[in-house]
Amino acid sequence: MTIAPILPWPLLAAVGLGALAFTVWSLRLRTPATQQRPSRPRSPRSLSPRKVRPALNRCLVVVLLLLAALRPGWAGGQSRTSTAELDVFFVVDTSTSMAAEDYNGTATRLTGVQRDVMAIAQELAGAKFSLITFDDKATVRMPLSQDATALQTSMATLQPQNPRYAKGSSVTGAGQLLKERLAAAQEQHPGRPALVFYAGDGENTSAEGPAPIDGSDVAGGAVLGYGTEAGGRMRDSSRNTAAYVKDRSQGGGQDAISRIDEQQLRSIAGQLNVPYAHRTAKEPVSDMLGKAQPGSLSVSTKDAPGRIELYWLLALAAFALAVPELLRHLRALRAVGSSAPKERTG
C-alpha cells in the first residue's frame, strides 16, 4: 500500500494532535469532582458512555478525514496519463465586444473562447493553468494550478462586461499583470516554459493607444482571434429584454456593430513572439497547438501503472459517523426553539 498526501506532513500531524488534545480537554470538562464528606478525598465522577461517545465520535471523524487526506491506495491496472511540464496562461478579453454574435454563425465570441480554452487544457493535461481576464481592468481569475475543473468553472462563469459600466478597454490592458505573473512563475520554477494564449477580437476602445506587451518570458502559445469583418451585434446585458447595445455615435437609434481587428491581433502576436490564428470553430485545436508549442517542449502520453484509491472509503465512513452527530444537534436546536417563551399578543 502507498500513500499520496494532499497536504504537507507537518500540517496533517498538527491537525491530528490538535483533535486528540481537544478530545481529552472536552472529556476533562465533563469530569468535575463531586463534593463528598469532608473526611473523604474528592473523587472524579465516572462518565457514562452516553456522555463520552459524542467526543470520541468527533475525534474519530477527524482521524478518518486525516487518513483520507493521506490518500492511501495500492497499485493496480493501467492508466492513461498525459503530462506537460509547462505553465499555461490564458489571457481572455471580456469586454462588451466579446458578446458580439458572429462566431460560428450567431454564437458569441466568448462562447468560442470558452470552447477553445478547455480544448487546449485537455490537450495539455498535466500543465499548470492560469486565467487572466481584462476589460477596462485586468484581473487574475485563477492563479497557476493543475486543477482543470477549477479552470472549467472559471471559464463557464465568464460573462462579457456590462455595457453600462464599460469605460473603454485596451487590447493590451492585461500586459502588465501578465508580465508580473510570468516573472513570479519563473521565480518559483526557474527554466519552466510558459505558454501564453491570448484570446480576443482586437477591438481597442480605449482613448489611448495600446501599450506594447513584453514577451521576453513567453516560450510559446498563440493569439486567438474571434469575430468577423462583417461584425456582429451585442446583447445588452444591462437590460432585462432582448435588446442590443446601441451605437451612441449614431444617436443611439441603431444597433452597434463590433468587428474583429486582425491587424491589431497580429501586432500582439508579434510582440509575444507567437503565431496568430483566426478561430471559426471549423479548425481543430490540435492544428493550432502544433504551431503554438516550441520544439523544446515535450508532451508525453503513455500507459502508466494504475492506482486504486481508498481515500473515498475513509471519507464515506467519516460522513456516516458525522450524520448522527448532525441530527443530534438539529434536534437540540429544535428543542430549544420549541421551549422558548412565545411573545404575548394583544
Image: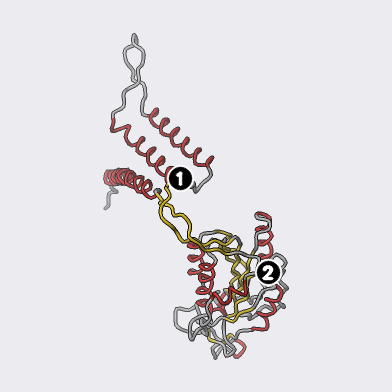
Q: CA distance from mark 2 to mark 1?
A: 44 Å
Assign a secondary structure to mark 2.
Answer: helix
Residue in the picture at 34% in, 8% down: 39
Residue in the picture at 28% in, 33% down: 50
Identified by mark 1, the residue type is Thr
Assign a secondary structure to mark 1.
Answer: strand
Left or right position of 86 against 346: right
Task: In this rendered view, identify the residue nearer to me: 89 or 251.
Answer: 89
First in sequence: mark 2 vs mark 1: 1
Tell me the residue that label 1 is attached to: 2
Q: Is residue 272 above or below residue 57?
A: below
Q: Position of residue 242 (x, y in %)?
A: 45, 83
Q: Is residue 5 above or below residue 172?
A: above
Q: Residues within 10 Å of mark 2 (few under 14, many from 20)?
A: some
Q: Is residue 80 above or below residue 97?
A: above
Task: In this rendered view, identify the residue nearer to me: 274 or 108.
Answer: 274
Q: How is the image coloured?
A: secondary structure
Q: Position of residue 198 (x, y in %)?
A: 62, 73
Task: In this rendered view, identify the residue nearer to me: 290 or 205.
Answer: 290
In which image quadrant can residue 137 be found?
Answer: bottom right
Identified by mark 2, the residue type is Gly
Question: Which labelled disc corresponds to residue 175?
Answer: 2
